[in-house]
Amino acid sequence: MKKLLLILFSLLTFLGCRNDNDAPAPETMLEHPDWYILRSPDNRDIKAVHGNIDDTLTITTGFEVFVTTDKGKTWTKGNYNARVGLFAFMEKQDTLYVMETQRTGASVFDNKFGMLPTWFSTDRGLRWERSTARWDIEDYKVPINYAFSGNGIRFQIDLIQTEEGYLHTIGIKSESGRKIELPARHQLVSLYFDKKSRLYVTGSAPLCGKENTFEFCDQANRSGTVYVSKRPVLF
């Protein structure tokens, strides 16, 4: 009996002294039957994503670039440090470009595009070099708020404007009439499809509160979000 009490005391002591760092980070514990849910390593929205979740995934949070090879459990920061805002990625002939300018129309419902690929990477986003080449702007224009599935169906961020003038991104819609809701509320930023036609959706941290407010559910963790569909999205 004395030996049993000693074992129990030792176990309780171990649990009481356990460091919180031994537990998985909250962002690695997110589970959903339809989506992989990744959070950015800094407290900014995720502006754009490129690659595929099975191999290498590259994101930008506007002024930083991060790369993960383990579905977002760990991130490696790229050496981009030009302090110019980033909006989109484009790959051409195994070279990854990042766009420094965003272009949109006069209406908030217009298409958005990333422009000006001043920086490029040949290792999927870890090391960046300034490009000295000239380019045709139309050849390096990347859609931001819409993307095409493997079947050529256009999907776009579904946006509404309230009577008070507030803008809300309420999900994803396709030209075929399909509507996709996400597990949480966010201000959505961009869409992307990988070669397996899995849909990637980037945006802010989860939002709570009233419809006309944009309060973060967790004020201490404002890291942006990227959703990745576990199955192809075609129609």
Image: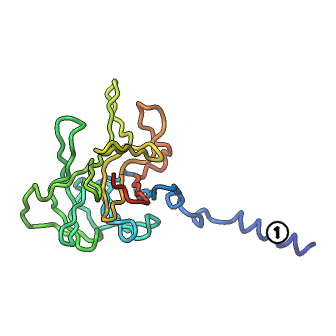
Q: Quadrant of residue 97?
A: bottom left
Position of residue 96 measured from the top left corner of the image (x, y, whole percent): 22, 67
Q: Quadrant of residue 10?
A: bottom right
Position of residue 137 measured from the top left corner of the image (x, y, whole percent): 9, 56
Q: Report the coloring of the rendering.
A: rainbow
- Is residue 98 visible in the rendered image? The answer is yes
Q: Quadrant of residue 54?
A: bottom left
Q: How many marks?
A: 1
- Is residue 65 visible in the rendered image? The answer is no
Q: Which residue is mark 1?
A: 8
Q: Outermost residue toward the top?
A: 163
Residue at the image point whose x is 39% and y is 55% from the top: 226
Q: The residue under label 1 is which amino acid type?
A: Leu
Residue at the image point whose x is 45% and y is 56% from the top: 35
> In which quadrant will I find the N terminus?
bottom right
Position of residue 156 measured from the top left corner of the image (x, y, whole percent): 29, 46
